[in-house]
Amino acid sequence: MPSSHKRIIERSTYGIGEWYGRSFVQMSGSERRRFAEIQLRPKRERPTIACPPRSIGRDIPCTKDGGICSLRRYQQSVVGDVFGVSGDAGQLCTTCPYRFYESNLVFQWIGEKILRHAKPTIVGEVGFLEREENAGADLDDRFGREDVGRIDHVLVHPDRSHLTWCALEMQAVYFSGESMAKDFRHIAIATGEDTPFPVGRRHPDFRSSGPKRLMPQLQIKVPTLRRWGKKMCVLVDRMFFDALGRMETVPDVSNCDIAWFVVRYDEDEEGAHLRPDSVHLTTLERSVEGLTAGMPVSLTEFEERIKAKLARQ
């Protein structure tokens, strides 16, 4: 295969990065076809497949429809070579939060940094909001109150003589564009061992994942946690964090509202492996600025844009 700097790229899009915990580019053609054929069956007829990141000591079934753990960007040259993009633009992009459970690494990392203990007890889905007595159930449907009604993970120091804990939100990335169904059909009939180029057009949707999903949760939960003197930890991958705007940080955990824990994926012949990357300590206000990833324009500039639109009407 020619070196990357000599390739003339014909097209590029996002496709499967990891499938049921396996690197798509390292899978054999028969493995890809098997997984694709499973997705084409009626849901009730699909066999149970383990979720490797959560299966420590026992098999825990994958609960994500399609089994896609992550996406990656692919390119195809004019001569038909298909390859994953290299460098920062080619990082794996996590689409299932359970992918972060690999080896319990992140829980140990956060426990050490925030609780000063590498083996915290993990408590899941603790109720945080209660509906007011006069609030109708339709409010949940209209405003998604259930989405922010619980703390997803609470990490507790094992010393029970004094309850010490922190909250944790794990945020994977949604994608926009065509569903994976077209890819599954294409993979199921593909021949040979070469990596097939994605047939659907799609991309990670950082706007839906960040400002629309994560930011409201932080705005509702963090003020209360701050009054309680507790920390909110947010776990994202490198690609998600790089899509955020710049956030001013504070020098110590005691001064932060939110601790951003960023992971990356190192890849070798055995697949992709989760690794700690960096920690960013910041306030709620600075986090919101980072999630919106923009600064307001001046009044003059805004009104010029209004005039320009009026002129085109």
Image (cartoon, rainbow, N blue to C red):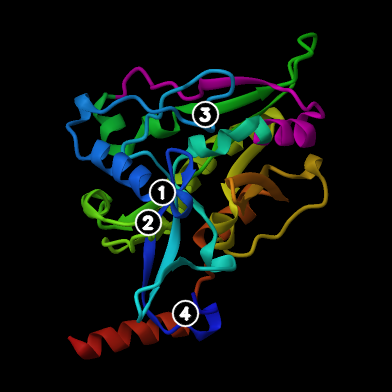
Q: Earlier in the sequence, mark 3 or mark 1?
A: 1
Foreground: disc 4 or disc 3: 3
Point 57% across, 27% down: residue: 153
Residue 193 bears which disc, if any?
2
- Looking at marks 3 and 2 on the same chain, the residue that comes earlier in the sequence is marked by 3
Q: Which mark is residue 71?
A: none
Residues under labels 2 and 4: Cα distance?
Answer: 57 Å
Task: Give the residue pinned by disc 4.
Answer: 299
Q: Which residue is disc 3 drawn over? A: 152
Callout 1 secondary element = loop
SS at circle 4: helix
Q: Residues within 10 Å of mark 1 (few under 14, many from 20)?
A: some
* Disc on the earlier residue, 2 or 1: 1
Task: Name the amino acid type tagged 3.
Answer: Asp
Is 116 within the magenta? yes
Q: Amino acid at mark 2?
A: Glu
Q: Quadrant of residue 103?
A: top right
- Please, which residue is most extreme toward the top here? 161
- Residue bearing mark 1: 28
Q: CA distance from mark 3 to mark 2?
A: 40 Å
Mark 3 or 2, closer to the camera: 2
Separation of marks 4 and 3 at Cα, in angstroms: 40 Å
Location of residue 241 by image quarter? bottom right
First of labels 2, 4 by sequence position:
2
**Label 3 residue SS:** strand
Residue range highlighted in magenta: 106-135
